[in-house]
Amino acid sequence: MGQDEIATLQMDALAARAAGDHGRAVLAWRAALAVRPDDWRLGLELKRDLKTGQHYPDSDASFRRAARSLPDAEWLAHYAALYAFHMDDLAWLEKRSAVLLRDRPDDAVLLTLRGDVARQRRDWALAAASFDAAQRCDLALPEIADKAQAARMYARLGPWLASHQEGGPAYAVAVVNLDRNGERRAVIEALFGNGPVPLHRVPAVEGSRLPLAAVQRLLGEAGDPARVGTLGCFLSHAAAWDSMARLGLGHMLVVEDDVIPLLPLPATIAPLGLPPGYDLCFVNDRMEPRIDPDGVDIFSLHALPDAMQGFPPDDNAPGGDGYIVSAAGAVKLLRWVAADGFTGDVDWRLLAYGMDGAAIAGLPRHAFSFTTLDRMQHDIPRLDRLQAYVLHPALIRTVGVSSDREDEDRERPA
């Protein structure tokens, strides 16, 4: 393809943008970048249409490749916003930030970026040192102090966990992943596939491929048929629960494909201290109780209602991106959703199944969690409840990539 063809693709992309067809514009920019993959100018144009179309640029491989050649100011803004959570970018990103730090050793953004890269690699000592240095350069960044404190906590916890690997119940990791998302599958296999815990892939349900009649039947009258991505996500988690009996598992860590482990996973669940008879335990960072990490040296469990007391009042996404479920818990969940349907978000349903009316009533009345769970307990009345917990500190952290669920909800309106 020559210069004329590139110019034609650019004209097509700009015409599509002017018409409000950002999906067509994205395809044209990608085609141009396939020919000139390191052209940061084309990359910025692609980024513009991705963002306007409500997609995360960092989920697009074409943009990430072009971003490596961005001028420093744009490069810093891009990576400072996206936390550098892509494995194939890390070595290149670390090298470039090191070069920049030689000229700008007191740049808090660069130091924070180096800390984020170290955190991604679970180098908690380097992460803490980088965040501490960033804070000394810019005392107006209180979130950096929180990152440094958490890094020190994980640096203490790592050796303790390594010394508590023997005995206890075995488990497996189940990763929910769409067939079309091979890049995320490769990343998750690299992150989880070389440890002591077996990894099983659960093919995720593509909600947009379901017939509308099936969507309406699965959601019932209260459901919104426009939220096919949300329905597909719910069904995918149900498929993970269903796989436990087939695989003969007593315990399973269910993760989505946009997460990273914060520590090497223990060989058994024993170090986590899960009690006999538990049904479910959230191990993701969004559900993590707000506890001073300076006093944390081992894992602790918190009953779900207690942990929810500190849940941010405006947060609308507790996340089903990381939780451990027992075989008994999976049986309960499958039986209950068969009766109650698949309306709404799977993470909020898990919370609703783990809290009774009194616990929900005890939540702050102005919080999104109270409004959501109070409505759900009336729409889906159920006397039984899961024996549910939240782990501190978290084992799993979600990353800043585009949500397949949200993308599908946007792309197939009612």
Image (spheres, grey):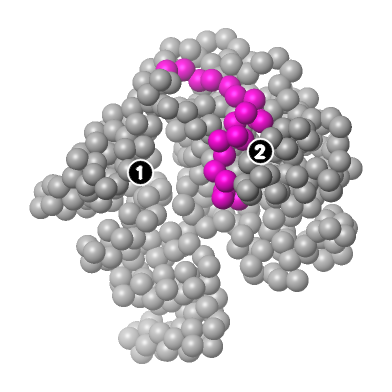
Residue that carries the numbered disc 2 in the rendered image: 363
Q: Is residue 315 magenta?
A: yes
Q: Quadrant of residue 122?
A: top left
Give the residue drawn at x 41%, y 65%.
62
Q: Is residue 256 above or below residue 166?
A: below
Residues at marks 2 and 1, CA–CA distance in whole angstroms: 26 Å
Q: In the image, 54: left or right of 135?
A: right
* Quadrant of the rendering where the N terminus is positioned: bottom left
Q: In the image, 63: left or right of 376?
A: left
Q: Which residues are magenta?
A: 297-316
Is any part of residue 117 visible from this angle? no
Is any part of residue 382 visible from this angle? yes
Provide residue 181's location: percent of width, then percent of height: 57, 55
Instruction: Name the residue type under label 2.
Output: Leu
User: Given the current orientation, which residue lies at the most extreme front position?
Assistant: 365
- Marker disc for residue 143: 1
Give the residue drawn at x 61%, y 35%.
308
Of the numbered discs 2 and 1, the one sitting upstream in the chain is: 1
Question: For the residue carrying disc 2, how many other residues have a C-alpha within 10 Å: few (<14), some (14-19), or many (20+)?
Answer: many
Label 1 sits on a secondary structure element that is helix
User: Given the current orientation, which residue lies at the most extreme left position?
Assistant: 103
User: Given the current orientation, which residue lies at the most extreme top position?
Assistant: 167
Instruction: Name the residue type under label 1.
Output: Glu
Provide residue 213's location: percent of width, then percent of height: 87, 64
Q: In the image, 309: left or right of 97?
A: right
